[in-house]
Image (cartoon, rainbow, N blue to C red):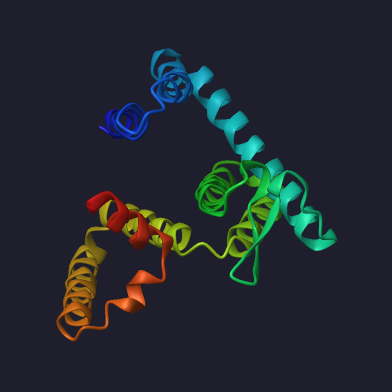
């Protein structure tokens, strides 16, 4: 389902807006990744995900170094509304946040899987976490929060009641924000702006 949404997004955004060839190579990258993971055997899958994890962590480290040293080449670091944000090797803060968030999750996974290298995975966790925070991406923070809640919901039956209650509270608060006319709080996010552009 996720792949279908991604491909549909490429087609809609590129073909109907006049960049009819972009989705071909963007879609191909996504297709190759998912085909590679789906058709490979278990050991190959582990190697692919491990390589993905190493790549993310290196990108996070490069981004942190660029941020500290003040390098702004290749848009590693950018200034948005007077605030410096980490964009990393991906050249975009939201994308960097999503990948470093995945790096955080994989660090915790590998740490629990291999106790002998626990300290190394904790260091890599810190690198990804620092990069994640430096992106200052509200979109990334929300996505990581949703991923954690979703994982808790699946893994722990005891937490389901609290998650459902919390989700209900968030929905009521959002409804209250719109009913009281304070939706400008939400409109500060670039995600909200994009939804408005899409709607228009």
Q: Position of residue 66 (x, y in %)?
A: 78, 54
Q: Nearer the viewer, residue 100 or 139?
A: 139
Q: Nearer the viewer, residue 168 or 151?
A: 168
Q: Position of residue 122 (x, y in %)?
A: 66, 55
Residue 184's place in the image compared with 117, above or below, is below
- Going 35% across and 78% down the picture, which residue do you hit? 185
Q: How many marks?
A: 0
Q: Nearer the viewer, residue 138 or 149?
A: 138
- Going 71% across and 50% down the picture, which residue do you hit? 76
Q: Position of residue 38 (x, y in %)?
A: 39, 19
Q: Is residue 177 left or right of residue 100?
A: left
Is residue 116 visible in the rendered image? The answer is no
Q: Is residue 108 left or right of residue 200?
A: right
Single out the residue that lies furthest toward the right: 69
Is residue 150 visible in the rendered image? The answer is yes
Single out the residue that lies furthest toward the bottom: 180
Q: Quadrant of the N terminus?
A: top left
Q: Nearer the viewer, residue 157 or 188?
A: 188
- Going 53% across and 30% down the picture, which residue do you hit? 49
Q: Quadrant of residue 177?
A: bottom left
Q: Position of residue 139 (x, y in %)?
A: 43, 59
Residue 95's place in the image compared with 164, above or below, is above
Q: Quadrant of residue 170?
A: bottom left
Q: Is residue 184 left or right of residue 93?
A: left
Residue 119's place in the image compared with 172, above or below, is above
């Amino acid at each position: 389902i996720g792949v279908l949404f991604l491909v549909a997004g490429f087609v809609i955004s590129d073909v109907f807006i006049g960049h009819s060839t972009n989705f071909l190579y963007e879609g191909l990258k996504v297709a190759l990744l998912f085909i590679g993971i789906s058709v490979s055997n278990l050991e190959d899958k582990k190697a692919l995900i491990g390589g993905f994890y190493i790549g993310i962590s290196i990108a996070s480290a490069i981004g942190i170094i660029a941020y500290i040293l003040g390098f702004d080449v290749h848009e590693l670091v950018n200034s948005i509304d007077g605030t410096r944000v980490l964009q990393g090797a991906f050249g975009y803060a939201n994308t960097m946040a999503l990948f470093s968030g995945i790096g955080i999750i994989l660090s915790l996974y590998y740490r629990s899987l291999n106790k002998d290298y626990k300290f190394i995975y904790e260091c890599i966790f810190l690198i990804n976490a620092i990069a994640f925070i430096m992106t200052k991406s509200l979109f990334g923070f929300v996505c990581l929060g949703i991923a954690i809640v979703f994982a808790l919901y699946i893994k722990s039956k005891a937490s389901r009641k609290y998650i459902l209650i919390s989700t209900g509270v968030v929905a009521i608060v959002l409804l209250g924000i719109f009913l009281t006319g304070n939706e400008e709080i939400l409109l500060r996010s670039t995600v909200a702006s994009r939804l408005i552009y899409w709607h228009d």
